[in-house]
Image: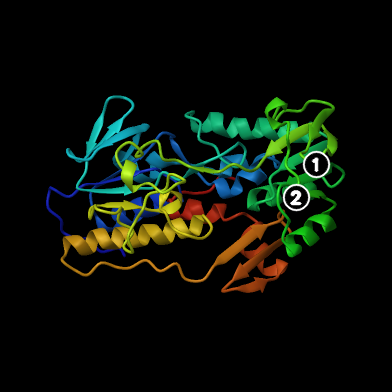
Amino acid sequence: MGSKVSVDDSVHVVIVGGGFGGIAAASQLKSWGVPFVLVDMRDAFHHNVGALRASVESGFAKKTFIPYSVTFKDSFRQAKVVGIDLPKQQVLLNDGGELSFSHLILATGSDGPFPGKFNKIIDMESAIQTYEDMVKEVQKAPRIIVVGGGSAGVEMAAEIKTDYPAKEVTLIHSRVALADLKEILLRKGVHLLMSERVSNLHTLTLNQFQENLLVRTDKGTEVAADLVIVCSGIKINSSAYSSAFGDKLASDGALKINEHLQVEGYDNIYAIGDCADLKGPKLAYSAGLHANIAVTNILNSLTQKPLKTYRPGSLTLLLSMGRNDGVGQVNGCYVGHLLVTFAKSRDIFVSQSWKNMGQIIPR
């Protein structure tokens, strides 16, 4: 990358969504000199891989939000996409604006409960303050329950016990935990309630210190807590495109695609990241791989070259268990905590995101 390609005035790529896949696609198009607009409802990229640490460690949140306009300047448009007009090849915005496209990359990502996800339409400084406020809630609570034992729940429980080892942390998960994760959590002093589901979640105050909350499970277990954090219930963000692609949606709202990551039936529209109907875990690094395929195929289609096929490859999964511990799997092999700590846990890849965006990380 780095050289420019010659394209005519009819070429204009619109990228919907500024998550990991969206900024990767935008950065590559920028380096090739291909006209594009990146659209996101927020004013800053959220490095949500570090969101859980930002909920526990004061001062970390400012490292997880990176302003779009500094990197992409006039090629960034802050707005919420409310629809896509396929016959006119236009993206429709909540402010009444319209963006015409020759090629479209859908990278709308997924949504879920705070603090793991943050999809509110507020400015970067307010978003950072929201996480700083969460840190204070964690600090006040001697007993904390984390609901959900997926990667987010496991990392949340570990982050809390790493910074506040004296706190009583209970993880409730509806399934059975993986043996190696269970071992690390128990070693850190996390209490585990496996194969139980919280039955009174709708009545509980979330993410806010409140003494003597009573959490009940479907097995009749009762646990007292002063703070409840939910780390489950991730859903595909499909609102921007669902009405346009009704017959191209998978059951979870993801877009059905071919081997080139093109939405079925459309050779100029691509889906990447969480909103692409692909098997396997939804990971930040996967979205970046998708972006590379989509941009390469846009360039290849413009230069009459064969399209590139996406092949998932081997699974790479690194779970941070606090800044000084972790567990992982690469090429089907277990990775020890020292390597994961060095590769991910120390800074949760935030410095890499600032580098990718061509900006200097705040201290």
**Residue 142 visible from this viewpoint:** no
Does residue 15 appear left or right of residue 19 in this picture?
left
- The image position of residue 160, as x and y in percent, is 76, 45
Q: Which amino acid does label 1 sit on?
A: Lys
Answer whether labels 1 and 2 touch (C-beta < 8 Å): yes
- The image position of residue 48, as x and y in percent, is 55, 46
Q: Which is more N-terminal, label 2 or label 1? A: 2
- Residue positioned most to the right: 166
**Helix, strand or loop at disc 1?**
loop
* Residue position marked by numbered label 2 in the rendering: 195
Instruction: Name the residue: 39% across, 43% down.
Output: 17
Instruction: Name the residue: 40% across, 36% down.
Output: 239
Alpha-carbon neighbours of circle 2 within 10 Å: few (<14), some, or many (≥20)?
some
Q: Which amino acid does label 2 sit on?
A: Ser
* Residue 175 vs residue 236, the one in the foreground: 175
From the viewer's perspective, is residue 273 above or below residue 332? above
- The image position of residue 115, as x and y in percent, is 62, 38
**Residue 323 visible from this viewpoint:** yes
On the rendered image, what quadrant is the C terminus found in?
top right
* Residue position marked by numbered label 1 in the rendering: 219
Alpha-carbon neighbours of circle 1 within 10 Å: few (<14), some, or many (≥20)?
few
Res 112 quadrant in image: top right
**Helix, strand or loop at disc 2?**
loop
Instruction: Name the residue: 37% across, 57% down.
Output: 291
Does residue 261 appear left or right of residue 253 in this picture?
left
